[in-house]
Amino acid sequence: MPMNCLGSRLAVATIAVSFILALPAFAQFAPPAARPAAPKTAASPRAASCHNGANFDRFLADVKQKAVAAGVSQRALSEASPYLVYDQGIVNRDRGQRVFGQLFTEFAGRMAAPYRMQNGQQHIKTYAAAFARAEKEYGVPPAVIAAFWGLESDFGANMGNLPTLKSLVSLAYDCRRSEMFVNETIAALKVIDRGDLTPEEMIGSWAGELGQTQFLPTHYVNYAVDYDGDGRRDLLRSAPDVIGSTANYIANGLKWRRGEPWLEEIKVPQNLPWDQTDLTVQQPRAKWAQLGVTYPDGRPLPNDNLAASVLLPMGRTGPAFMAYPNFAAYTEWNNSLIYSTTAGYLASRIAGAAPMRRPAGQVTQLPFNELKELQQLLVRAGFNVGKVDGVLGQQSRAAVKAMQIKYSLPADSWPTAELLARMRGGTAQAQPASAIR
C-alpha cells in the first residue's frame, strides 16, 4: 500500500524528497484507457545481470514457482499469464523520473485547495455510515481517510491507466528493486486468487499501485476489507471498501493512535531554539508553551504532557506546525516532507481547521544548481546526503542543520544563500551526532 506518489508514491519514497517533489501521479494520469482483452506481448529485454544472466522468460518461470510455493493456485497463474509481460517503457519511467522545485506553500496551495477540502467533506457526508463504522472499528477520523483519498486519486477520478501485472513484473525483472517487486507480483496474484479483482481489472499506476487510495498489492492483500458485504475487496469501485481498507491500513499498518491529533498550525517566537525544531525532537506541549509557542491566533497551547514536535517545512520564516506522534503515519505513507505535511494539513482543513497563515515575507528557496552545489559541499564536509542530485531529503536536511549549528546560524534545516556562502568560503568537518540534536 501507500508509501509513494510521484508518478507513484514509490518514486518519492525512493528519492526521499523533502523540498523538491516530482510530479505526482494524480496530476499526470489521463482518463483510464479502455481495458484490452489481452495485452500485446512485449519484446524480451536483454538478460538482467542481477538474475545470473537469466532471460525474462526464465526469470518469470522462477517467479511463478515462488508464487505457487506462496500458495497461489494454477488457475490464478493461468489467468494472469497473458499479462505477465515485460515493458521497457515502465522501467524507463522508473529510472527517468524528473523533479522540480516547489515550495510547500505552493504545493499545498494546489493540492489542498478549497475544492478538494469541500470534496472531502461532501464524501464524508455521502458515505457517513462507512466513515462512522471505520472510525469506530479503527479509530481513524473521517477527515484523515478523506484527505488521502483526495490526494491519491481525487476520490477515484484518477487511478492510473496501465496494466498492473505488466508494471510489476517489468520492475521485478529490473535490477534496481527486484526483490520488492517480485513480492508485489506474487501479492497481486493472490489478489486475483481470492477473487477480489481479475487480471484485466488490474489497471493502475505505472509502479503497480491499485485503487482509489493507491495500495501496493502487498497492502491490498494484508489490509483490504470487504465493507459493502459483496464478498470482494474492491478498491477500484466500492467506496465503502476504500474507506474501510484505508482505515485498516492507517490503524494497523501505520500504527495510528486513536483519539490523538496529527498536525496543527502554530505560531513560533523569534527566539525559539531553532535546533529543537525537528521531527526527531519531541517535547511535551507544556514545554513548547513555556518556550512561547502558541496557536496562530495567540491562544496558549494546552498545558499537558502530550508529546509533539515543531515542524518547519520552509524554515523559521515559513508556516509552522505542531506535529504529533500520529504524524508519523503520514511520513510512513510517503516520506516526502512536502507531501506528508500537505496530507496532514488537508486532513485538518477537512476536519474544520482554518487556512494556514501565509508567511509575512517571501521565503527564498535556493535554485536547483545551488542546492546541488550545497550537497557537494556537505559531502566534502563529511556528510552522507545520499545521491547528490539537487533534491534535499532527510539526510541533507540533517546535514544542513549540523552546518548551521557550526556556523552559528539559525538551525532550522532550511538551506539558505548565507549557509552556501559560508561553506563556499571554507568547508568544515562534520559535527558529531550529538551536535545535530
Image (cartoon, grey):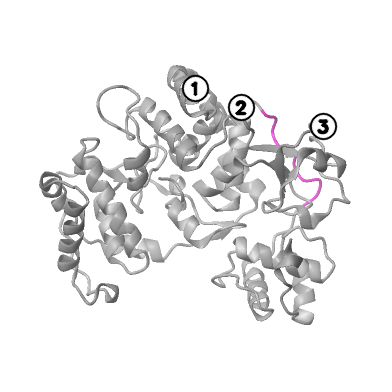
- What's the distance in space between the residues labelled 1 and 3, CA to CA? 32 Å
Outermost right residue: 271
- Quadrant of the frame with the C terminus: bottom right
| Residue stretch in magenta | 353-362
From the top left corner, tell me how far across and down residue 264 is, in percent. Answer: 69, 36
280 with respect to 292 (left or right) = left
**Mark 2 nearby-residue class (10 Å; few <14, some 14–19, many ≥20):** some
Determine which residue is flagged by label 3: 297
Determine which residue is flagged by label 1: 136
Residue plotted at (71% across, 66% down): 400
- Name the element at disc 1: helix
Q: Amino acid type of disc 2?
A: Ala
- Name the element at disc 2: loop
From the top left corner, tell me how far across and down residue 296 is, in percent. Answer: 79, 35
Sooner in the amino-acid sequence: mark 1 or mark 3: 1
- Name the element at disc 3: loop
- Magenta stretch encompasses residue 359: yes
From the top left corner, tell me how far across and down residue 406 is, in percent. Answer: 80, 71
Determine which residue is flagged by label 2: 351
Sooner in the amino-acid sequence: mark 2 or mark 3: 3
- What's the distance in space between the residues labelled 2 and 1, CA to CA? 17 Å
